[in-house]
Every structure is written in structure tokens, then in C-alpha cells.
Image (cartoon, helix red, strand yellow):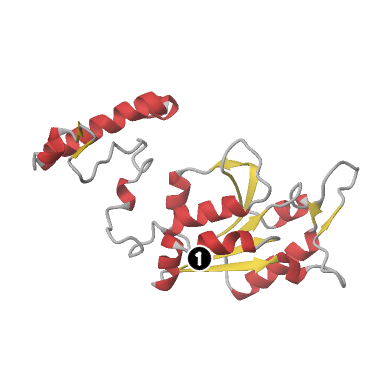
């Protein structure tokens, strides 16, 4: 079973997305454990302080080292963690291959950044991997943590109803998914491609591959170029 511990200054941001749909199914089936930890519970002093002004001046606040260290070491005292992830714009871009790798782990900690970020010493001492959703800035790392968690737990065997579903997702083979159609066969004078009604599964798979390649070429030339170089 995969266990994911998420450290957050605003845990309410995680409760809804991770308490619904696929993540909920994963936990209900006892295929994953998702634990959300409120950093304020480990804050300092009467007011449970977790942030302070940056040394050297500048705008914004920084999550302090001590509350994070206390919580991380508490978790690590109970079990060994394969990864301690920090969600940061500095990190490696999150891709399907990373989700695949993380889905094979047993225990993961995800630290959600907030304000201007976290004390660098936490990154130096505990963090094993930094992950970014892209070249933009969010108000906090909770959205990134939820996205990473969702992408990972849906890959666990038994979570999805169809075991082949995750394997046919976009990016699993480096390509975008082909166009999808469902009933009715004709909608506002637009009919689905005849090949999908042919019953010839080899022909259908060939059509889907062709469509995936063409869609990738048009919409994500960066992926197509990478695939072309690999071939």
C-alpha cells in the first residue's frame, strides 16, 4: 500500500480534491493512505507561528525551518520514506514518467510551499526531490500536491475499474490520446468515424495510433520532436 503524507499550512485546500473521485476510491479500497498534516499544529509559541520575515529583507514571508523539521522528523520516526518532495517552481516539471515512478514507492512526504517558500535549510536537509507543475506561480503548493497525489494513486493496481485505463492515458506512450466518441452515433449531423464502428480491432488501433501521432504533432510539437528523435 502506498502512503502519502502531505504537509500544509492550509490543509482545507486539500480536503475536497483528495476526498472525492479516484483518490477517495483508492483510500476506500485500502490501496492507498493519504494523510494531510496541518503545519500550524507544530507551530511555535502561543500563536503557533509557522512563518517569519526573510533574513536580508524583502517582501513576503517564509515558512520557518523548526515547525517543518519537527513534523518531518516525527513522520520519519514512524517509517522510512522513499521520497520527501517539495512542490516548488524551481523543481523538475511534473510528467507522467514521474507519476509512474512515484506509484511504485511505499511512503512519500509532500511539503506544500506557501508564502514565498520554505527555509532553504529544510530543502538542504530533508527534501529528496523538488517538483513543479510548470512555469507559473501558485498561491501555495496545495494544488500541486493534490495534482501529484491524484496522478499517482490512479496508477495503483485495482484503483481504476478497467486495469488498462491508466495505461491508455495521454503521455503514457509519449503521445496525446486520440479523439474519443460515445453515443449517439450521429450528433447534430456529425457522425463518428466509420472505422470505430467496423468491429476490426486491429484497424481501430491503427487509426487511434495515427490520430494520436497527428494530434501530438499539431498540439505538442515538442513531444512529437522528442518521440521522432527516439525513433
Residue at the left extreme of this rendering:
199
On the question of residue 229 being in view, the answer is no
Expressed as whole percent of the image width and height from the top left, the position of residue 169 reads: 34, 46
Badge 1 crowding class, 10 Å Cα cut-off, few under 14, some 14 to 19, many 20 or more, is few
Residue 184 screen position, x and y as percent: 20, 44
- Quadrant in which residue 58 is drawn: top right
Asked if residue 34 can be seen in this view, the reply is yes
> Does residue 147 appear left or right of residue 60 in this picture?
left
Residue visible at 36% across and 25% down in the picture: 217
Q: Residue at x 68, y 66 (%)?
A: 72
The image shows residue 180, relative to residue 104, as above or below, that is above
Q: Which residue is mark 1?
A: 19
Residue 134 image point, x, y percent: 57, 38
30 is higher (above) or lower (below) than 130: below
Helix, strand or loop under label 1 = loop
Residue drawn at x 15%, y 39% is 196
- In terms of depth relative to the viewer, which is nearer, 155 or 105? 155
Q: Quadrant of the N terminus?
A: bottom left
The percent coordinates of residue 124 (x first, y second) are 72, 51
Q: Nearer the viewer, residue 209 or 68?
A: 209
Name the quadrant containing residue 216.
top left
On the picture, is 120 further left or further right than 11? right
Amino acid at each position: 500500500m502506498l502512503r502519502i503524507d502531505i504537509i500544509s499550512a492550509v490543509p482545507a485546500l486539500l480536503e475536497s480534491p483528495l476526498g472525492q473521485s479516484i483518490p477517495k476510491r483508492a483510500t476506500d479500497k485500502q490501496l492507498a493512505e493519504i494523510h494531510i498534516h496541518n503545519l500550524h499544529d507544530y507551530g511555535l509559541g502561543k500563536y503557533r507561528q509557522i512563518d517569519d520575515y526573510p533574513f536580508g529583507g524583502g517582501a513576503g514571508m517564509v515558512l520557518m525551518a523548526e515547525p517543518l523539521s519537527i513534523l518531518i522528523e516525527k513522520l520519519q520516526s514512524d517509517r522510512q520514506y522513499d521520497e520527501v518532495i517539495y512542490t516548488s517552481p524551481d523543481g523538475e516539471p511534473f510528467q507522467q514518467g514521474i507519476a509512474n515512478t512515484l506509484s511504485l514507492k511505499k511512503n512519500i512526504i509532500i511539503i506544500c510551499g506557501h508564502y514565498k517558500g520554505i527555509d532553504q535549510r529544510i530543502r538542504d536537509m530533508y527534501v529528496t526531490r523538488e517538483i513543479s507543475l510548470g512555469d507559473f506561480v501558485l498561491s501555495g503548493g496545495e494544488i500541486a500536491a493534490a495534482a501529484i497525489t491524484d496522478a499517482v494513486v490512479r496508477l495503483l493496481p485495482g484503483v481504476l475499474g478497467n486495469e488498462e485505463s491508466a495505461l491508455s492515458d495521454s503521455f503514457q506512450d509519449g503521445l496525446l490520446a486520440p479523439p474519443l466518441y460515445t453515443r449517439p452515433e450521429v450528433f447534430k449531423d456529425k457522425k463518428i468515424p466509420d472505422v470505430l464502428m467496423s468491429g476490426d480491432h486491429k484497424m481501430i488501433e491503427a487509426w487511434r495510433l495515427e490520430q494520436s501521432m497527428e494530434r501530438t504533432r499539431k498540439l505538442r510539437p515538442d513531444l512529437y520532436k522528442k518521440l521522432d528523435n527516439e525513433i
